Structures are given as C-alpha cells and as structure tokens.
Amino acid sequence: MRTGTAALRSMLWAAAIGMTLAITAGLAAQEKVLRPEVQQLVQSVGEKLQAAADKLGLTPEQRTKLREIDSGQAEQRTALRTQRRNLLQEELKSLASILTPEQREKIKEFTEDRIEQARESDAGLPRFSAARDTLAERAHSAAEKLGLTIEQRKQIIETLSNHMEQHVALRAKCREAAEKEFQAALTVLTPEQRSKAREQIEDKVVIAGASRSIADRLHVIGDKLGLSDDQRQQITKTHSQFGGKYHALRSERLELMQEELKAVTAILTPEQREKVRDFCEDRVVIVEVTATGATADEAVKALRETIAERLEAVSDKLGLSAAQRSEIRNVQSSFAGKFKAQRDQRVALRREELQALGTHLTAEQREKAKDFIEDHALAL
C-alpha cells in the first residue's frame, strides 16, 4: 500500500482547525467529536467549562461542584497524561537512530502536548492547520525546520506504524475519561447550559472522505447502526491493524496535493498564495458565526479531492480571474491520473478493512457499511 508517489512525505494525517461558517440544525444534530486538547487531556472538561463559566452563566454553587468533579478525575487524568508522555518518549527513542544529534535536540520540544492556536481566516475562506497527535506527525509537520531528508521522512512513517496500535488504544482511554467527566458535569447544569457546554468542549467538523477509514465512519454513526460497546471495542482493535497503511496513503496523498499546490501557486498572486497555503489539509472545523450566511455545505466543497477543485469552490472569494481559472483547470487535468491511482488504493484498503470488520457486524450493519468504501465527506 506504500506504492504511488515516493518522493517527499510530509505532514501525515490531515486535520485542520477552522472555517467561519454558520451551523445548520442538521449538522448540530450529528454526533460530535471532542477537541484534540480535551481528548489528549491537555485540558480537562472541567477546565474548559470553568473557563467558560461566565458564558454559561454558572452560579457560584455550580462552579464549586464542577471543581469538585474535576478534582475527582484528577488522579485518573494524571495517570493517562503520564502514559501519553511515556508513549511520546518511546517514539522519541525509536526516532533517535533516524535523526542527527542536532535534530534529536530540536525534536524534544515536540514530546509535550500544547494547545495550538489557529490563524485567522481570510474573508470566510477555510483555514487549515494540522492536528498533530503523535511525535512522528509532529516531526513531519516541522520537516523543513528539522531539515529532514526524504529518506528520513520515509523512515519516520514506518516508525509511526510501530506505535499506531498504542496511540489508538490510549486515545480511546483519554476520550472515555473525558466523556465520563462531561456526563458528571451535565448533572450540575441546567438544560440550556448543557447545550452551550457541549459547544465549549466539542469541535464541529467536516472531514474529507479521502482521509477516512471504515472504522471512522462506523464510529460516527455508531448509535444509528446500533453498535454495542463490545462491537465498538472490536472495531477499534481491528482498525489498529490497518493504521499504518492508512497513514502511508494519507502521507502520499498530502505529498501529491503539495506537488499540485506548487504547480498552482505559480498561477496565483502573492496574496492569493498566502490565503491558500494550508489547503492541503483534509478537515475543517466549523465555527458558529452566523453573520457569514454560509452553511456546512461550504465545508464539504472546501474539502474536495484536489487542490484545483478546492480553489474552484472559493474562486470568487479569492478573486480568481478567468485566465487563472483556465490555467488551474489545465493543472488539474495533468494531475488527474495520479489522483485516480491514489483513489483506487484507498478503495482497495477500505474493502480489505471492511472484510476484516465484517465478523464484528450484523448482516444489516454490513449492508449499510458497504457505502463507506467510496470517498464521502464525513460530518462530526
């Protein structure tokens, strides 16, 4: 599965923060995902809610109870944070033989979890920045800063595969702990506060179909499919066997998109290039700003398969001329074959994963999951 483009392998899995859009009722009803800093326990649910105490209109009594709940989770949270830190340190040791002494020194700072601020969007355009969960992903995101060679980037991808199952399992534990704390916090809040509280700790996201696995899609609509806790655990465990393959394909995809972006930027003005420099990512988080009058559909358009298609979706906002649009379409045609080859690889991998997951699903669930093989945008 590591065939296809073999040159530059940069930032691994696609993620991004931010698009200024209105939230439609349909999207709000979808299952949501915890913010990365909560899921990694960089910030606890209690800390997020206490920071938003004034927005939520919390009474002194409610604030005290939330602090007590947060304190009651402290021991488990500390233990999970320690496990995560140890896992990142294990990755650091694995990467040591790949890096130069100077690179090893620079990468040490990446073993600490930090909350990253997204840059401001331009006139409603999507803005993308990678969510880096593993040390290998962080190394790739800073490849230029670290001075990584093509061979080093390839070896880092392979190293990530060795730790993928541990990351998946630990991420599930952290999410479970955060959800447990959130459920406890809900008992302290009024119905109106509960709705607002979710907005404070969750991201509303749309994810490009090209970056998603069968397991991702099953988890998103788990309730609709009637998945049991045991089924969810089995799905997570089975998916970990495919994690390395998905990361390799995502890396190759971003490499191809960056190659296309370089070809396209020659057509753009300096100002336009600055606005689209992060368009290679495959996830946007929707921020509720109703003044834009936009909808979640715009997020899906912004996450089309190729750079050229993404530029087409925001061509008016970028101020692209007729000549620029024509040249961009020519670039798109020249990359069409490469994107199709990658698309075929993704479909083949999803078929393989679905077959492995099939034993954990009912006949009805398997039938519904057949549609997950093709690329479809995924709303959380």
Image: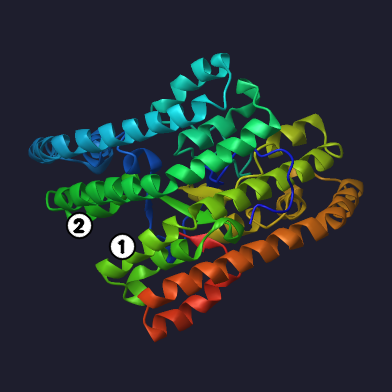
Q: Position of residue 47 (x, y in %)?
A: 24, 34
Spot occupied by residue 274 in the image (x, y as percentages of width and height): 71, 32
Q: Which mark is residue 86?
A: none
- Which residue does the image show at 36% across and 38% down from the upper left? 37
Mark yes or no: residue 208 visible: yes
Q: Is residue 129 visible?
A: no
Q: Quadrant of the C terminus?
A: bottom left
Earlier in the chain: of badge 2 and badge 1, it is: 2
Residue at coordinates 53% horizontally, 71% vertically from top-left?
372
Quarter of the image for residue 144 reads top right
Q: Farthest residue toward the bottom?
A: 363
**Number of residues whose C-alpha sits closer than 10 Å to that of mark 2, classed few (under 14), some (14–19) or many (20 or more):** few
Q: Nearer the viewer, mark 2 or mark 1?
A: 1
Amino acid carrying label 2: it is Pro
Disc on res. 233 = 1
Tag 1: residue type?
Gln
In the image, residue 61 sits, relative to residue 183, either above or below, namely above
The residue at the point 71 percent across, 50 percent down is: 314
Corner quadrant of residue 114: top left
Residue that mark 2 sits on: 191
Q: Position of residue 318 (x, y in %)?
A: 74, 43
Question: Are dots 2 and 1 in contact, CB under 8 Å?
Answer: no
Q: Give coordinates of residue 300: x percent, y percent.
A: 60, 59
Q: Nearer the viewer, residue 149 or 189?
A: 149
Give the colour scheme shown.
rainbow
